[in-house]
Amino acid sequence: MEHYDVVVVGAGPAGCSAARKAAEEGGKVLLLELQPQIGGPTKSAVWVPENFPGREFALAEVSEVSSLHLHAAGEELAFSAGGRILNRQVLEKLLAARAAEAGAEIWLGSPVKEFLMEEGRVRGVVLESGDWREKVGSEVVIDASGSGWELSGIFRRRFGGWKREEVMFLSEYTMANALPRKEVEIWFNSYFAPGGKIWIYPLGDGFAQFGISGLRLHPEAALDEFLGVENPRRLGRSVPVASSRGQFPIEDPLLPSCGDGVLSVGAASSQTRIFSSGLPLAMECGEMAGEAAVNGITEGDTSREGLLPYERRWKAKFLGELRAERLVHRSLSVAWDRKFKELLTLAREDAELRRSLLRLMQGEEVGRALMMMVEREEVREILGEERAGRVKALLRGEGVEE
Ligand SMILES: Cc1cc2nc3c(=O)[nH]c(=O)nc-3n(C[C@H](O)[C@H](O)[C@H](O)COP(=O)(O)OP(=O)(O)OC[C@H]3O[C@@H](n4cnc5c(N)ncnc54)[C@H](O)[C@@H]3O)c2cc1C
């Protein structure tokens, strides 16, 4: 049986970042990906803020963004915005390349079926595909297998204090023959995308990404219906040339997020964003996981206790903010579009509120954006005083673990 210090399951943004960091810290690392390619067909495009790691991902860049247009219940608010749209299929290959450069070994087409257990602790993984079955030993396993796959369910049941995964469903089309624009457009619509949104991202050269997320079970039907009813002008003569569907969890992040010999990170652990892409968050938590895994090995303690620095670190940085974001989402989700319309009306006269909405949609300084919002009396009225008070407390770090 082959043996590694750290085995990382899943080569998404969390797994690639964990593998790179663990290898940089001196670990012997294996990164396992179920799909035959990294950044597989369901990965599409992501809007990242200007400060997203330098220009090192320039190869993945497909468009700049010039403005953001928010729509809700007939109200439209347009304001200038920055950042870039990155092609995730390319971005994730670049992230994997960085992991490999740091020394991580990568196996494609390698589905992990189970954790390898010994005396109640994880000692590696079992790979299984058709007739092929192989065990790989390791000091620590990092579960970065994303949402809705079997392995994260096993982690949840065995280590993560089982609770049902609440998910947002999504569907996306890559549209060809779209009008060449640099605007990001987002609609909040209670009928087509309850609790979620519909978006158009520019992809450059007459292409656009047209997607929907929400609590509806058949997002692609909603996307087609929206196209028929709203007929966004820039998509008027366009046709879909690729489609994908997916889901991501929206319940509070998973706790505990580590057990004896194992850590869970990224969407597998519900470390996701509600209003923006969870990709930068998954990358940062991935780095924390990779570092903690190698530290545990170096210190000779890879029990849950020895891996706890990972959990303490991500909780200290993100838990309050992520719980606050979820609470704001729950507060807005009844009469979703009417409440967003009220927010847009307020933001029309309020530059700071516009900046906060932009930060929220881009996933940049989310805690700061939410705090600014709940400090406005009119926003507190929309959210409800009691919930707004809890959001404020969470952002101040009070009652985060209750
Ligand atoms: C269109 C779209 C919109 C999204 N919108 C949002 C959003 O608004 N907010 C948000 O937070 N997230 C959103 N997500 C999800 C977002 O992609 C994740 O938050 C982010 O990718 C998390 O990265 P990850 O590395 O944890 O998981 P993933 O990117 O899902 O990567 C997991 C990887 O593990 C692999 N894998 C799974 N099981 C196994 C196994 N048993 N063995 C080996 N490999 C395995 C998968 O093939 C995959 O490559 C969206 C996703 C899509 C597709």
Image (spheres, helix red, strand yellow):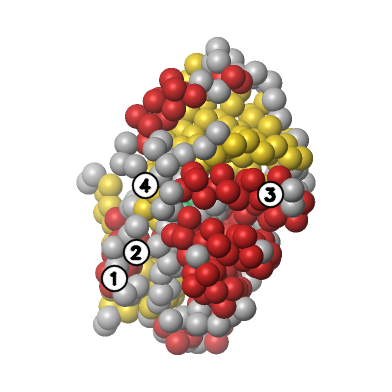
Question: Distance from label 1 to label 4 (Cα)?
Answer: 21 Å
| Amino acid type assigned to the residue bearing label 4 in the image | Leu
Quadrant in the picture for the N terminus:
bottom left
- Secondary structure at numbered mark 2: strand
Question: Which residue occupies the foreground of this view, 10 or 172?
Answer: 172
Question: Distance from label 1 to label 2 (Cα)?
Answer: 21 Å
- Circle number at residue 125: 2
Tell me residue 130's x, y (percent): 24, 44
Instruction: Give the number of the mark in front: 3 or 1.
Output: 3
- Secondary structure at numbered mark 3: helix
Residue at left offset 62%, top offset 54% = 360
- Circle number at residue 215: 4
Cβ–Cβ below 8 Å for labels 3 and 4?
no
Tell me residue 137's x, y (percent): 38, 68
- Circle number at residue 162: 1
Residue 66 to residue 238: above or below = below
Instruction: Give the number of the mark in front: 3 or 2.
Output: 3
Residue 252 to residue 354: above or below = below
Answer left or right for 385 relative to 344. Answer: left
Queried on whether the Cβ of the residue with tag 4 lies below 8 angstroms from ligand 1, the answer reads: no
Question: Which residue occupies the foreground of this view, 229 or 182?
Answer: 229
- Secondary structure at numbered mark 1: loop
Mark 3 or mark 1: which comes first in sequence?
1
Q: Is residue 313 visible?
A: no
Q: Is residue 225 visible?
A: yes
